[in-house]
Amino acid sequence: MLSSSVRSARCPLSNACYVVTTVTTHQFPLFHHHGNAQDVARWLRASDAERRTESFAWAIMPDRVHWLFRLRRHPMTSVVRWLKSRSAHALTQRNANQGRIWQPGCHDHSRCDERDLLARATDILSLPMRAGLASGLHGYPFSWCRWPV
């Protein structure tokens, strides 16, 4: 988790691109269940629809989410907090779960260079394949990329 001084220094950068990873509590494979993964995908899309972010790629792995996006109107920590809050509410209702869904914080893989967006998006799309969850870049139902790769 980033320190508050680091977070505050990085947050105000609108139009900056980030790769963020957030993990379920105790790395529980909550997203093996397709309905749970669909809930998270819905909120990733809603973030773009509400102009919080401009997503370039994401992969919802069994116990984590990897997300490449450009900030729009909100700071990164606010966007991640919003995603985790909305998705946790939906997942709690779906699973009648009373416990915490997400681990606190997230891992920010640093701001992205615009020239590296396609390479980073391809890396995210390849995660399910490297984890043995898909046979190719497009063989996993819970990954998405803005560009054809």
Image (cartoon, rainbow, N blue to C red):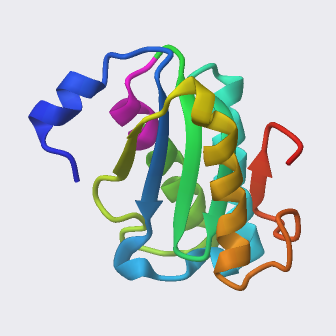
Q: Main secondary structure of the magenta part?
A: helix
Label tally = 0
Residue farthest front in this picture: 115
Asked if the magenta segment contains residue 76, the reply would be yes
Residue at image location 44% in from the left, 70% down from the top: 24
Nearer to me, 122 or 145: 122
Residue lying at 63% horizontally and 19% vertically, measured from the top left: 51
Q: Position of residue 45 (x, y in %)?
A: 71, 38
In the rendered image, the vertical position of residue 144 relative to residue 97, given as above or below: above
Q: Is residue 43 visible?
A: no
**Residue 71 at x, y = what percent?**
51, 23
Magenta segment, which residues?
A: 74-81
Specify whether residue 109 is in view.
Answer: yes
Residue found 72% across the figure and 58% down from its top:
125
Q: Position of residue 145 (x, y in %)?
A: 77, 45
Q: Is residue 22 left or right of residue 43?
A: left
How far from the left and from the top, in percent, is residue 139?
A: 88, 70
Task: Tell me what residue is drawn at x 66 percent, y 45 percent.
Answer: 119
Q: Which of the pair 144/122 is nearer the observer? A: 122
135 to the left or right of 101 = right
Q: Is residue 77 above or below residue 24?
A: above
Quarter where residue 134 is shown:
bottom right
Q: As drawn, is 5 to the left or to the right of 53?
A: left
